[in-house]
Amino acid sequence: MASTPADRIELALVRIEKAAAARAYAHDRITQRHAKLRARIEDAVSSLDALIAREAKGEED
């Protein structure tokens, strides 16, 4: 256990740095997951648009 104020401050700084790193990692992960999900949704919407266009064209014929 830290016996001096300087030791306690040093330990507190280590805890803060670890927490900040964990938060940054979590943020990066969420950002990556969001980008992947967005791409999948865009693909799905494009597929639906193409299907609707084919169906509309088929009804015209």
Image (tube, rainbow, N blue to C red):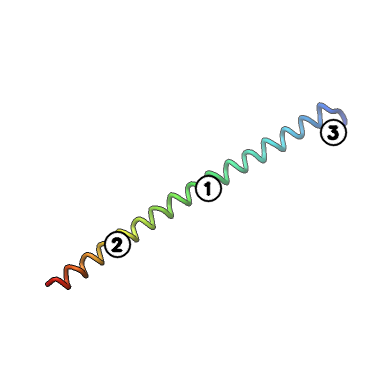
Q: Is residue 57 above or below residue 42?
A: below
Q: Quadrant of the N terminus?
A: top right
**Kind of element beneath mark 1:** helix
Residue 20: image location, x then y, percent: 64, 38
| Residue position for label 3 | 2
- Depth check, front residue: 51 or 32: 51
- Work out which residue is located at the far left of the displayed protein and give it: 61
| Residue position for label 1 | 29
What residue type is disc 2 on? Ser
Q: Is residue 39 above or below residue 1?
A: below
What residue type is disc 3 on? Ala
- Tag count: 3
- Work out which residue is located at the far right of the displayed protein and give it: 3
What residue type is disc 1 on? Arg
Q: Nearer the viewer, mark 1 or mark 3?
A: 1
Question: Which numbered disc, 3 or 2, marks the residue that appears first in the sequence?
Answer: 3
Q: CA distance from mark 1 to mark 3?
A: 34 Å
Question: Which numbered disc, 1 or 3, marks the residue that appears first in the sequence?
Answer: 3
| Residue position for label 2 | 47
**Kind of element beneath mark 3:** loop
Residue positioned 22% across, 64% down in the render: 53
Residue 14: image location, x then y, percent: 71, 34
